[in-house]
């Protein structure tokens, strides 16, 4: 048996988008992923669901280098024919011990590949607007470890030379020794007025950047509570940051936002929020489940030609109904001439994925708007099938019934899913989350109905802001005697994010 290649892969500085394509290719092949603590958990989703994912940082800290269990795991798994990805923060060869791991593999006769990653210095520089080199003031850059005690004579770092370095210094792992590093550099002749910066949690919504003169940096870091993981920049380029800082100017930068949609559907909102610089947290408040009894749906599918219209009020409904149709061994021809309606753009998009184009999508995306749009189209007396969740508003059915023959069909099940003891509920209680997004009345009731007095008080005081998707959802919030901070003008996730941006700008 040939032994598969072990991949030593750089995961980048934190932002999930800063992973290389090669890293994704390797992860897709993985049977075993050995990852470091600082690696973003979403990156593990590139590996197959069946792959084993093991966090190894804690293990490593307590063991002698020679018997590192990481090395043993890598070698044993590779010899057993498994594809191993060793996923490391930043770049594997920049203060990452990648060389040691490669050496161990080479000695064991196991082939390996090294996949570079965006190292923390590069990530932090880009996201904080610090040009590492600059034609006017920095012709060189040095990456330095601050892990060693600079006052010890046997320190492997030549601080005397670095004090005279003609360019930008970037210090990794330096926060616990910041005082001594600064004192040493100044004692060796570096100007204490040299511009300096600390970037913590670089590339993430939690990023914090502190700028000060070199001499003042330790005091300011203490005062403002900036600590590891962080990189320290020293050099004249730091002074140009104001012109280049873009990330920290994003409209929702640093805002902590709770996304309450079902897990499978939270992705788009999480992505939009992250694009705006926010820090999204997902706490699914309702859950989508397949029906336990398909009899009614199967009957409807088998008699589809008798319906003139098939109306969908959610992407879930589309996927459940058409998914079932396919599971029965049928294809889209079963729809025949049945006309299709979708309540909004996401529902229409779900239809498009099945190569179907809705005949009607209203200009606004609530049941009332859909009913009005349909009544304009549907001739009186026609048969309409409403495919929807097993709970929800009856208004669409009621409005249409005056006009045509309506049958309502539950095609998926929706249940409340709030875990009152979850970590995120605690974060809400502690006031660590500023915005809560509510994208349906059911979600609003499921979440708000579970809040304790502390959370309610924070909402009433405006410390937690509720942002809703539509007037109907706002109504559900007010029915629970809580205030709505902002409401989307367009009933979509994009609309909710926009409402939040408006609120912050005010
Ligand atoms: N191989 C990694 C470095 C590992 S050493 C790389 O190439 O980036 C760990 C140090 O990296 C931390 O102490 C900190 O100085 C830096 N670091 C890693 N991720 C960081 C981040 N998101 N923001 C700021 N510093 C980070």
Image (cartoon, rainbow, N blue to C red):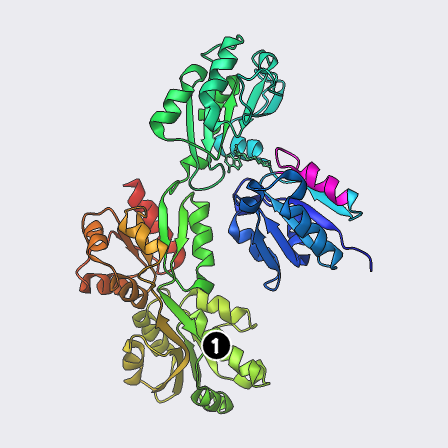
Residues packed near mark 1 inside 10 Å, few (<14), some (14 to 19) or many (20 plus): many
Element type at marker 1? helix
Q: How many marks?
A: 1
Relative horizontal placement of residue 336, taking residue 297 as reference (left or right): right
Residue 300: percent from the left, percent from the top?
46, 89
Residue 101 vs residue 472, the one in the foreground? 101
Residue 342 in sight in this render: no
Which part of the image, by quadrant, shows the C terminus? top left
Give the quarter the ligand 1 occupies: top right
Which portion, as a residue range, is magenta? 91-106
Residue 259 vs residue 105, the one in the foreground? 105
Residue 159: percent from the left, percent from the top?
58, 15
| Image vertical order of residue 173 relative to residue 456, above or below | above
Relative horizontal placement of residue 278, taking residue 52 as reference (left or right): left
Give yes or no for residue 138 being in the magenta stretch. Answer: no
Which part of the image, by quadrant, shows the N terminus? bottom right
Residue 337 vs residue 197, the one in the foreground? 197
Residue 83 vs residue 395, the one in the foreground? 83
Residue 140: percent from the left, percent from the top?
63, 19
Q: What residue is disc 1 on? A: 320
| Image vertical order of residue 419 relative to residue 227, above or below | below
Ligand 1 under 8 Å from disc 1 Cβ: no
Outermost residue to the left: 481
Residue 490 in sight in this render: yes
Residue 170 lies in quadrant? top right
Residue 372: percent from the left, percent from the top?
32, 73
| Image vertical order of residue 17 relative to residue 357, above or below | above
> Which residue is located at x 74 percent, y 59 percent?
81
Relative horizontal placement of residue 489, taking residue 250 as reference (left or right): left
């Amino acid at each position: 048996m040939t032994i598969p290649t072990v991949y030593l892969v750089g995961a980048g500085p934190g932002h999930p988008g800063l992973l290389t394509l090669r890293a994704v290719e390797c992860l897709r092949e993985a049977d075993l992923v050995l990852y470091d603590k600082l690696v973003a958990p979403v990156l593990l989703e590139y590996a197959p669901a069946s792959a084993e994912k093991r966090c190894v940082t804690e293990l490593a800290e307590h063991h002698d280098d020679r018997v590192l269990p990481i090395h043993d795991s890598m070698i044993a798994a590779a010899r057993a024919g498994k594809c191993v990805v060793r996923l490391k923060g930043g770049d594997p060869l920049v203060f990452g011990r990648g060389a040691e791991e490669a050496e161990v593999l080479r000695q064991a006769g196991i082939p390996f590949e090294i996949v570079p990653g965006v190292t923390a210095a590069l990530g932090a520089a880009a996201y904080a607007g610090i040009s590492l080199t600059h034609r006017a003031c920095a012709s060189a850059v040095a990456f330095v470890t601050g892990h060693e005690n600079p006052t010890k004579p046997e320190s492997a770092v030549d601080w005397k030379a670095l004090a005279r370095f003609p360019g930008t210094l970037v210090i990794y792992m330096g926060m616990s020794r910041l005082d001594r590093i600064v004192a040493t550099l100044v004692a060796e002749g570096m100007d204490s007025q040299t511009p300096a910066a600390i970037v913590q949690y670089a590339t993430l919504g939690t990023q914090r950047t502190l700028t000060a003169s070199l001499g003042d940096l330790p005091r300011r870091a203490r005062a403002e509570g900036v600590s590891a993981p962080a990189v320290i920049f020293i050099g004249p380029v730091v002074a140009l940051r104001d012109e280049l800082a873009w990330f920290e100017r994003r409209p929702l930068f640093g805002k902590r936002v709770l996304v309450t949609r079902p897990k499978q559907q939270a992705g788009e909102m999480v992505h939009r929020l992250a694009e705006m610089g926010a820090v999204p947290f997902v706490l699914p408040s309702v859950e989508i489940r397949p029906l336990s009894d398909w009899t009614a749906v199967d009957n409807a599918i088998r008699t589809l030609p008798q319906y003139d219209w098939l109306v969908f009020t959610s992407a879930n409904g589309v996927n459940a109904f058409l998914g079932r149709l396919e599971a029965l061994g049928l294809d889209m021809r079963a729809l025949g001439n049945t006309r299709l309606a979708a309540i909004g753009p996401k529902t229409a998009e779900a239809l498009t994925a099945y190569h179907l184009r809705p005949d009607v999508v209203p200009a606004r995306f609530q049941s009332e708007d859909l009913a009005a749009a349909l009544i304009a189209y549907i001739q009186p007396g026609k048969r309409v099938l409403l495919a929807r969740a097993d709970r929800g508003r009856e208004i669409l059915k009621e409005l249409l019934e005056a006009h045509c023959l309506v049958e309502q069909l539950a095609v998926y099940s929706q249940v409340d899913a709030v875990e009152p003891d979850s970590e995120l509920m605690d974060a809400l209680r502690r006031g660590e989350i500023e915005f809560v997004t509510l994208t349906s009345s059911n979600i609003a009731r499921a979440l708000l109905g579970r809040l304790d007095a502390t959370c309610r008080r924070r909402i009433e005081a405006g410390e937690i802001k509720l942002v809703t998707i539509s007037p109907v959802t706002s109504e559900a919030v007010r029915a629970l005697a809580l205030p709505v901070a902002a409401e989307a003008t367009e009933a979509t996730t994009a609309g909710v994010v926009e409402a939040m941006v408006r609120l912050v700008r005010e």
